[in-house]
Amino acid sequence: MSESNQIDINSLHHTVLLETENDSLLEIKPNFYRNLSDFIGNLRKQEFDGVENKIKDTMIEMATELTSLLIHIRLEKIANSDNFDISHLLDEEKFILDSHEEQNERIEMILSATISGKSKFLESLAENHKIKKVVIRFLSDVDEIIGADLERYGPFKVEDIATIPYENAQALIAKKIAIKIRWED
């Protein structure tokens, strides 16, 4: 990539090619995904007619496929390696791996409690999870509901955002009445 950290379709392709040709995790500039996001975002903002618009759409599709391929290749290398250079991980990849670590800890917690006969702990864990609050956005109007925590929620209108118990949120999401959103401070 150039010194200015600018990304274009050729440099993205080159990066993916290098990553696929090497067994070890490559060192990539720390702001790679952010620069890539800027590149794709800028492409999306451009307005063209006819053939130029088709070319733009094809470039966006290529960049999207290459990005997905790069992330999957890098994560697969990490999963299949016992000794990768952690300094080669980008912050966004560390974010992904953090969730894998948490999942493994939860698996061990459930397994340990189950084989240790700690059914009260499992019951408490399940109950707490049912009433754990989740942020959702409504896609349809919904009348007042009684939550898994026996509290009243609503009524809600399309595009309302609410924090409700996990069990209720999952039911609404399954019926395509709402979608889960991430609420970052």
Image (cartoon, rainbow, N blue to C red):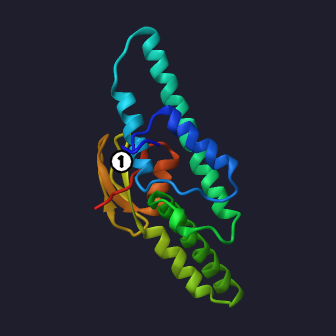
User: Is 20 or 76 nearer to us in this picture?
Assistant: 20
What residue did someone put label 1 on? 137
- Which quarter of the rendering shows the C terminus? bottom left
Q: Residue furthest top?
A: 50
User: Is 2 or 158 nearer to us in this picture?
Assistant: 2
Q: Position of residue 91 (x, y in %)?
A: 44, 61
Q: Is residue 52 left or right of residue 84?
A: left
Q: Indicate the secondary structure of the residue bearing disc 1.
A: strand
Residue 24 versus residue 112 in the image, above or below: above
User: Is 71 or 119 nearer to us in this picture?
Assistant: 71
> Which residue occupies 51% across, 67% down?
87
> Which residue occupies 30% across, 50% down?
161
> Which residue occupies 68% across, 90% down?
117
Q: Label 1 sits on what residue type?
A: Arg
| Mark 1 residue crowding within 10 angstroms, few (<14) / some (14–19) / many (20+) | many
Q: Position of residue 97 (x, y in %)?
A: 54, 65
> Which residue occupies 42% across, 69% down?
132
> Hey, which quadrant is residue 153 in on the image?
bottom left
Q: Position of residue 119 (x, y in %)?
A: 62, 86
> Hey, which quadrant is residue 182 in on the image?
bottom left
Q: How many numbered marks, from 0 up?
A: 1
Residue 40 versus residue 116 in the image, above or below: above
Residue 67 versus residue 31 in the image, above or below: above
Q: Position of residue 133 (x, y in %)?
A: 39, 65
